Image (spheres, rainbow, N blue to C red):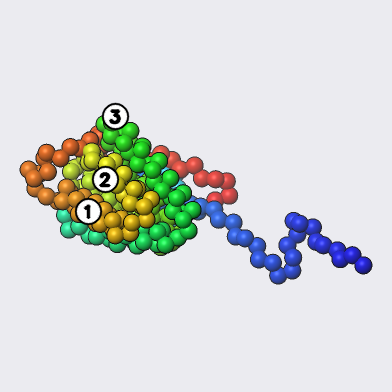
Amino acid sequence: MAQRTAPRNTPSPGARLEPVFRASTVDMIAERIREAILDGTLPPGAPLGEADMAHQLGVSRGPLREGMQRLAQEGLLGTVRRRGLAVVTMTPEDVSDVYLMRAAVERAAARQLLRSDPRHIKQTVKLLTTEQRKMSRAALRGSARLLSDSYLIFHRTLVDAAGSQRLSRSIRTLLVETRLCTFSIHGSFKVRAGLPESHEQLVQALAERDDPKVAALLETHMLEAVEWLTAPPKSVEDLETFAAPTPDSPQPLDRLELPEGI
């Protein structure tokens, strides 16, 4: 007697259904504010009043408060006496600490990547090469924004390639803090013109699976960034940079478009 089979769209007894993930209102609020910090719409020191922010985003205060507390836990918002939460302002000590942590995270990610399947390494090198070339084109055009955006994507791609949720979660916040370091120290949006060349060397070292060279290049990159951000102006004034205009004061945020059912 032939065995009957259940229809394909009917789970067998005891089968585990895959969860459906959907961004919550809190997730969307946190991401919108995070993006505004990243692009300078909310500069260092910008106060985030609950009533005003809730009105701008078109959300109630409950999820807004939760979203902002999430960013405070990440270190992107801090408490200002009698003013509530505000975007943090980075000090030279913060700069050193951010890049110290970045060095640890990115070194661990690169080491894990180089232990993976050669096909995965090759695919990651391909993705990094794409971003490095975007950086080069941006530098030729003198576009600080495009250069910096590709820089951030490059480093996030490198860390994500390690396949570690915790490393990826860490770098996501650290890269926003990297932008905050620039905004806080320079008071504007600036980026070093030599980034494409140094990242080309990093891509080549990864392609050659040269772990010691990758480690050395990452260490040099972090140390040079700290020096650029914290050294007296006269010692780095000859370093070529690109700049882009940024708002002098906080700008209004666009209203969130919440999916039906959230």
Residue 81 sits in quarter:
bottom left
Which residue in the protein does label 2 denote?
Answer: 198
- Gap between marks 3 and 1 measured at Cα: 26 Å
Which residue in the protein does label 1 denote?
Answer: 220
Q: Residues within 10 Å of mark 3 (few under 14, many from 20)?
A: few
- Gap between marks 2 and 3 measured at Cα: 18 Å
Which of the pair 55/190 is nearer the observer? 190
Residue 188 sits in quarter:
top left
- Gap between marks 2 and 1 measured at Cα: 9 Å
Q: Can residue 96 be seen in this view?
A: yes
Which residue in the protein does label 3 denote?
Answer: 141
Query: What secondary structure is marked by label 2?
Result: helix
Please, which residue is most extreme toward the left here? Answer: 234
Query: What secondary structure is marked by label 3?
Result: helix
Of callouts 2 and 3, which one flags the residue occurring earlier in the amino acid sequence?
A: 3
Task: Tell which tag, 3 or 1, sits nearer the viewer.
Answer: 1
Which of the pair 163/145 is nearer the observer? 163
Residue 11 versus residue 144 in the image, above or below: below
Name the residue located 29 percent from the left edge and 60 percent from the top edge: 212
Amino acid type indicated by mark 3? Arg
Name the residue located 22 percent from the left edge and 53 percent from the top edge: 220
Of callouts 2 and 1, which one flags the residue occurring earlier in the amino acid sequence?
A: 2
Residue 127 % position (x, y): 43, 45
The disc at residue 247 is none
Of callouts 3 and 1, which one flags the residue occurring earlier in the amino acid sequence?
A: 3
Which of the pair 192/112 is nearer the observer? 112
> Is residue 10 shown left or right of residue 27?
right
Residue 218 % position (x, y): 27, 54
